[in-house]
Image (cartoon, rainbow, N blue to C red):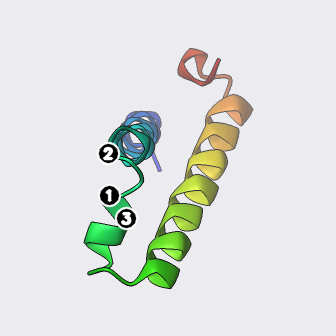
Amino acid sequence: MSDTQLIALSKLLDYLLVQHFEQGSELFVIAADGEHDLAHDMREAVCLAHVATRRAMRERDMPEAA
């Protein structure tokens, strides 16, 4: 994945997590058609992907990861 793709992915995941909390935790429930277990798994997957993205950015010494 290129540096610009990592930055884009990081921003997308940031946006999803911010929207999740700003919408009263309903974003992933809506995406999961009301299935709360699936919504929880979606949120967890986004969090894990976000951590992996930020780690990759730090490993590349990208200033955006600071």
* Secondary element at tag 2: loop
> Residue drawn 59% across and 15% down?
63
Q: Report which residue position mark 1 lands on.
A: 27
Q: Residues within 10 Å of mark 1 (few under 14, many from 20)?
A: some
Where residue 49 sits in the image (x, y, percent)?
57, 56
- Disc 3 element: helix
> Is there a contact, CB below 8 Å, between mark 2 and mark 1?
yes
Between circles 2 and 3, the one closer to the viewer is: 2
Task: Pick whichever, 40 or 50, lies toward us.
Answer: 40
User: How dense is the environment of label 2, judged by Cα within 10 Å: few (below 14), some, or many (20 and up)?
Assistant: few
Residue 12 position, x and y percent, is: 35, 43
Please tell me which residue is depicted at 47% across the width and 50% down the height of the picture: 1
Q: Where 1 falls versus 37 (above or below)? A: above
What is the distance, in whole Å, between disc 1 and disc 3 at their CAs?
4 Å
Q: Amino acid at mark 2?
A: Gln
Quarter of the image for the C terminus: give it. top right
The reply to whether the C-beta atoms of the residues labelled 2 and 3 are less than 8 Å apart is no
The reply, left or right, for residue 50 in relation to residue 13 is right
**Is 52 placed above or below 56 here?**
below
Query: Can you say whether 32 is above or below 46 in the image?
Result: below
Query: Where residue 7 appears, x then y in whole percent?
Result: 43, 33
In the rendered view, would you say 36 is above or below 15? below
Name the disc covering residue 23, or none: 2
Q: Which residue is mark 3?
A: 28
What is the secondary structure assignment of the residue under circle 1? helix
Give the alpha-carbon distance from disc 2 to disc 3, as whole Å.
10 Å
The three-letter amino acid code for the residue at tag 1 is Leu
Dot 3 amino acid type: Phe
